[in-house]
Amino acid sequence: MAHKRLSILVLGLGLALFDHPAQAHHSELAEFDPNQPVSVTGILRKVEWQNPHVWFFVDVTEADGTVTTWGFSTSPPGSLMRRGVTKDAMRIGAVVNVEGSRARDGSNHSSTRRFTFEDGTAVLARPE
């Protein structure tokens, strides 16, 4: 009888564990290289306020007049809101400066270490 109860308990625990999809989370270092700092100034064009990370996109006008779009990954919406940052704080069309670490794949993607408006007002700033 005890063996049967143990089997039912193990089966129940197994079902409970595998009933929900696995939620893996990667280290920022897996995707971004801290030895490749990025600092851009441009126009905030888009904000994707969703889990697992908020992404925002900045259009940077190069010296030759071409526009390069950079994508920046930051914390999840809940983490940002707990720090007082809302989607409304990231004003589309504003001139912003963003600092972070470039994507390891060499694309125009970066983590976000600091996000400030043209007047120096910080929206996001990680402790150094």
Image: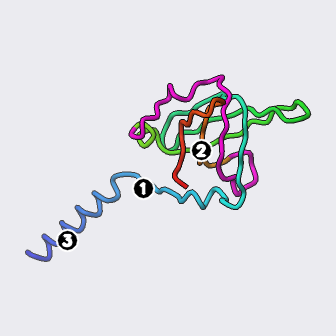
Pointer 2: residues within 10 angstroms few (<14), some, or many (20+)?
some
Where disc 2 sits, the SS reads strand
Is 39 on the left-hand or right-hand side of 52? Answer: right
The residue wearing badge 1 is: 22
Q: Earlier in the sequence, mark 1 or mark 3?
A: 3
Q: Does residue 32 belong to the magenta stretch?
A: no
Magenta residue span: 82-109
Where disc 3 sits, the SS reads helix
Tell me which residue sits at (79%, 36%) in the image.
68
Image coords of residue 92 (percent x, y): 61, 24
Q: Earlier in the sequence, mark 2 or mark 3?
A: 3
Tell me which residue sits at (9%, 76%) in the image.
2
Image coords of residue 12 (percent x, y): 22, 61
- Say which mark, if any, is on residue 114: 2
- Say which mark, if any, is on residue 125: none
Which amino acid, mark 3? Ser
Looking at this view, name the residue that lies furthest to the left.
1
In which quadrant of the rendered image does the C terminus lie?
A: bottom right
- Say which mark, if any, is on residue 7: 3
In which quadrant of the rendered image does the N terminus lie?
A: bottom left
